[in-house]
Amino acid sequence: MAALRYAELGYPVFPCAPGRKTPLTKRGNRDATTDAALIEQWWQQRPNANIGIATHGLIVIDVDAGSTWLVDEPDRSADLDAAPLSHTANGGRQQIFRQPHERLWRNTAGRLADKVDTRADGGYIVVPPSMLSGGKAYRWADGLELDVPPAELSEPPQWLIDQLDELATPRSKAKPARATIPRTSSPTAARVASGSPGANAIPSGQRNATLAKLAGTMRRAGMSRSEILAALERANTERCSPPLDALEVERIADSVARYQPDQITVALIENHWAQMYAPPRADGPPDPGPFPDRLLSVPGFVGELAAFMVATAFRPQPVLALGAAIALMGTLTGRKVCDDTNTRTNVYCLGVCPSGGGKERARQVNKEILFLAGAPEMAGPEGLASHAGLITAVEQQPAILFQLDEIGRLLRTLVEPGRSPHLYHIATNLMKLFTSSATVYVGDAYADARRNKVIHQPHACVYGTTVPQSLYEGLTAENVTDGFLSRVMIFESSSDRAPRQRPVIQSVPDDLVEVARWWIEYQPGGNLAAENPSPRPITATTSASAAFDALDDVAEQTQLALGDPLGTLWTRATEKARKLALIRCCSRARESPEIDEADAVWACELSRYLTERLVYLASQWVAENPFDAKRKRVLRLISDAGEVGVTRSELYSRTRAFTTRERSEVLETLLLCGDVVEQKEQTGGAPRVRYVAATHAAEASS
């Protein structure tokens, strides 16, 4: 229940009338509480009640739809981006801050600006997932959810504190005395340089972007490079924790001073300073290349099944066939085996190939085998309408295979929770199921206890197929950092369409059906296996364990070297290798399995390749904001052209959706960061400009 989650964080809540903002309790927001028992009682009585949060100790800036507040002050608008942001049901927004120490601010209406109210002591707000009449819902902005306790909220920026102090009613405390700000070269610089390391500290992950934004504010006011540098040096010393290197501060000042004031204004409005003035990056993660042929060979059921899929396909896709066979083997062995670390065989495999490339054959064969082996119920739904539907399917059939076509389209939907809130939590529940395979899955708490789900050792496997563009455009920074991508194994075909062949028309071989039936009927826990699974432990040889340890060392070192967010994709590399080794072992020796060195080496090589490829893809596609997405798109266009590169006219033709300013700023950023080099060719007239990726340019000159 969302109300309980807010209360657990420390926000007192109370119920409001369904479809309205009117409190249901006698004293309204004064009845707000964090008492879980009382909250459950309230929502058991009114399950559809909206959620109110009392704003004592908070300061909420409530901006109505149509307000023009801060439209002409983009630097101040950007200052508010650190706060949780709720899009209200009526098209406005609410940004939530913590009141500074010794303030006792109260509510105001239209005093801060037209159509801008504040909610503080004595007030309340309605929060997601509440809805107003007509189905209009409150929703958190992506990445700006209210997910920290009140004490960890940011305080308002100093300029807003000053304004709110001026609006304070006589009931508020007297305004605290202000420390005198030493004189600087301009009023703007004085404002930028002020602040204490406590309330206005700039943490390490935001130092470059924040200083660049402050520098942009000063440049817009017409300040020179030396004036900007002086203010940045002071802000760096007094506010950055820890301070940046002095040369880095100088580089920011130099970069900003190169722009004219009108360009700075546009850049601030688009809020992409983090990308324009990030520190120069080292070369990105390398591309490990196409799928290694040696990894396609798997003994036993998996290899034979993949070979049958390839032989009977109109367009053979051996890599996708391997991923599908692994997913089916993982399903058949679900809740029946584990290794000596209690790792299970639940896997999430995605098959990626171009449209019309032959994605469907592997899914068809998997369904047919489960049907012929007498377990059609293990083939789960081929579409997911909601996260609740996902959990219900696993509850009814704990060992289940979801075969989802166009899963990339689903992932793209998941990044827009406001449009499809019923789909948004599918990825979250898939992550929970993945990590609950050896224990108990406990679902969300509902006021109606009959809706609460508890599943013992759930074993959900996924084999999804998609076209590359659909999948990669759906990848987000949240997918990288929240652990969803680290659980996935992506099996990619060649970028070229597979050649057609005359498929072999034959039924599924009896041997494959017999193996599938053997695993379906295998019950290591006896008659109680369905309710209380007791999987058979399969040990690993000493040499196999050494292979896992070696991969673990590589994963740890690589994760540290890459840093966040890409390094997080290595966190489950060894776990995936253990799952793969267990699957290979069961594939070749179901009667007396033991994970040997060959199983472990193949699994570690496959996991390492898939992880390296995933890191590379994420570095190419995952964007942190719209500007970063444009930057990566242009870099891909230039990189894909190889050593020849692209001419300016070619690049303009392929980025027609960009404005001239956007295109210029993206190119400027790529050149500044060293990702792209500019080459000029002498022609009969004016020189022709050509852009080449730095890696290709270095190869051509070597």
Image (spheres, grey):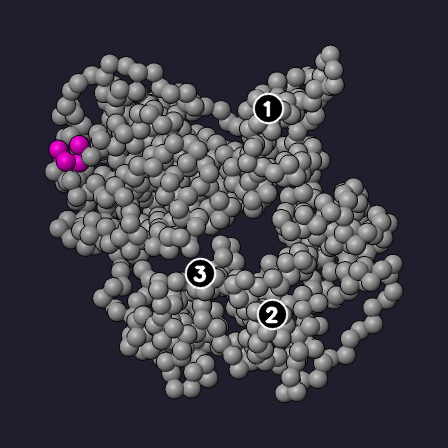
Q: Can residue 153 be seen at all in this image of the molecule?
A: yes
Foreground disc of the pair 3, 1: 1
Residue position for label 2: 114
Using residue 202 as the reference point, say whether residue 468 is left or right of it. Answer: left
- The dominant secondary structure in magenta is helix
The picture places residue 537, in percent across and down from the top left corner, at 28, 43
Q: Which mark is residue 623?
A: none
* Residue 79: in magenta span: no
Q: Do residues under tags 2 and 1 come within 8 Å of each other at their CB atoms?
A: no
* Residue 370: in magenta span: yes
State the separation of the CA atoms marked 3 and 2: 23 Å
Residue at 50%, 27% in the rendered image: 288
State the separation of the CA atoms marked 2 and 1: 47 Å
State the separation of the CA atoms marked 3 and 1: 41 Å
Residue position for label 1: 650
Label 3 crowd bin: few (<14), some (14–19), many (20+), radius 10 Å: many
Q: Which mark is residue 139?
A: 3
